[in-house]
Amino acid sequence: MSRKTISSQALARSYGTERTLTFLVGLIAVLGAAAVFAVSYGILGEFRARRSLVDPMAVDWLGGHALASRIGAIVLGVVLLVLGLWWLRRSLRTEGRPDLELDRSDEHPLTVTSSAIANAVQADAETVRGVSRARARAVGDSDNPALRLTLWLREGTDVRQVWDDLDTHVLARARESLGIKTLPTAVRLELETGNRQRVS
Amino acid sequence: MRVFVRLLSTLLSLAVAAGGALLALEVGWYWWRPASSPLLVPWTRWRETLAGVGWDSFAVRLTAGIVAAAGLILLLMSLSARRRDVRLHDPATEVSVTTSPRSLARLVGHRVRAQDNVTGATVTASAKKIRVRATSRLEDENQLRPRLLEAVSALLDVVPLLKRPKISVVVDSPKDRR
């Protein structure tokens, strides 16, 4: 699907991994609690429900496989630690603001800083008819830089017109001035309410 | 919701990392020096306490109930934290456009209120469905509803949405109450 392109990835910060992991933790909690209920209400055997939480049978089994269960527990612990640290790093990372490397040659390296692109495109976008406010920022990593552009439109603006103008005016000029053929861009259109204008 | 999930995700990741570290540490320490364990977590005392608790005790059921409720909350929150933006067609390659459901609703509301004999309208929109509830003093539902449907439909023809949402229009008019 087209969701995989750089520009569609730039539409919003991705939380897919965090969401999936949170979902899995919730699922494990629900299933575990269901299993405990099943044991507790004697579904898995009338006598098992009456035995202690530290079930003698389970303890015997673990004692019989002492080496395997110790190694298993340590491996599980290390895996959980690594997973937890990777997950923590992922959910605490900030979204990158990559600079645009136009020329990577050693003699004349040319880099446009992310704030420079953002300011230029923002100023340009605000000149489009119907756009009251614009915000631009560079997103992604330095290998796949992209632009995220948020446009606030005045009430009553022809969205179709703005949509048509986006590529031909704003982005074309940005590409021209940067001298590149493609600039992956994610555009978010927001329509303002006209309430404020009625006052004046 | 997305902020909550991010926060929860950070806390859960910390809990998973800490739990894993403690598990590996305690088991390793017990293996190496059984005499001087436990190291950090008083798990021998826990084991003695738990040995006196049966599976069918109230405490176990209560704990399981609390865990199930917390798990359900996590499930619901992570499911409801999805992105709700409405995709538009790409105007060019490597250019993607979205708009918020609220903006789409405003766009539709603006069009609906511009129709004749519409006193007011509330619109809710998502990528799949647009619901319009219009009030009118002069026209009843049978007269106004087809006209509004047509107007919204004409608007959606112009706005380049990736998927055309379904439209539902309800007209609230005092003429229908007679």
Image (cartoon, rainbow, N blue to C red):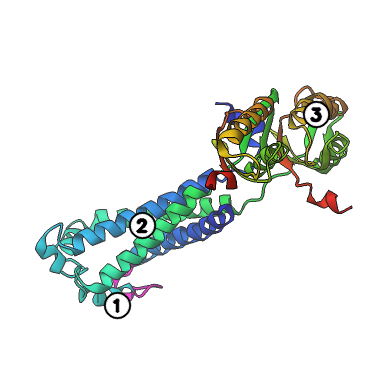
The type of residue carrying mark 2 is Ala
Circle on res. A29: 2
Residue range of the region highlighted in magenta in the rendering: B30-42
The residues tagged by marks 2 and 3 sit, at their Cα atoms, a distance apart of: 48 Å
Q: Which mark is residue B114?
A: none
Q: Nearer the viewer, mark 3 or mark 1?
A: 3
Chain of residue at mark 2:
A
Which residue is disc 3 drawn over? Answer: A171
Question: Does the segment drawn in magenta span residue A130?
Answer: no
Residue B114: percent from left, percent from top: 73, 38
Alpha-carbon neighbours of circle 3 within 10 Å: few (<14), some, or many (≥20)? many
| Residue occupied by mark 1 | B45
B125 or B109: nearer the viewer: B109
The chain holding disc 1 is B
Instruction: Say if labels 2 and 3 share a chain.
Output: yes
Q: Mark 2 vs mark 1: same chain?
A: no
Q: Quadrant of residue A40?
A: bottom left
Question: Left or right: where does residue A109 sit relative to residue B42?
Answer: right
Identified by mark 3, the residue type is Leu
